[in-house]
Amino acid sequence: MSSNTSLYSCPEIYAKELLVLDVGTNLSVLRKWKVSKNETWVRVKLASNKFFDDPNKILKGWIKM
């Protein structure tokens, strides 16, 4: 990511914004969703430490590419 981006609940522009990701956030790509020729979304999982992180922390969501 070249700038901060938002993590959304589903691959729609009006979806609920879950959180804003900082530049350099470690992500794993789970799948890619091509809505149209000009709109692609990626389902991602944030890196976490299950021993130290809050169990209610949001770990998965969608980002618009």
Image: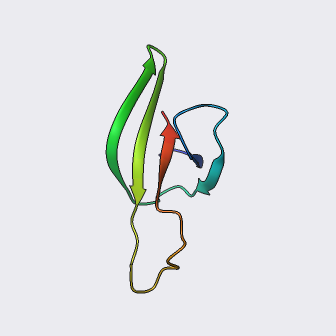
Residue at left offset 56%, top offset 58%:
22
Query: In percent of the image, x 62 and y 54: which residue is there?
Result: 20
Task: Name which residue lies at 49% across and 43% down.
Answer: 62
Left/right of residue 3 with respect to residue 41 in the rendered view: right
Q: Is residue 9 above or below residue 41?
A: below
Is the residue 28 above or below the residue 8 in the image? Answer: below
Q: Residue 56 in the image: x percent, y percent?
A: 54, 73
Instruction: Write the residue at 53% across / 79% down.
Output: 54
Question: Above or below — where is 37 with respect to 45?
Answer: above
Residue 7, how many percent across, how many down?
Answer: 56, 49
Depth order, front residue of 22/12 = 12
Q: Position of residue 25 (x, y in %)?
A: 46, 59
Q: 12 and 29: which one is in front?
A: 12
Residue 16, given in percent of the width and then of the height, sits at: 66, 45
In this rendering, position of residue 64 left or right of residue 6: left
Q: Is residue 16 left or right of residue 7?
A: right
Total numbered badges shown on the rendered structure: 0
Is 5 rendered above or below residue 35?
Answer: below
Q: How is the image coloured?
A: rainbow
Which residue of the protein is positioned furthest toward the top in this rendering?
37
In the orientation shown, which residue stands out farthest toward the bottom? 51
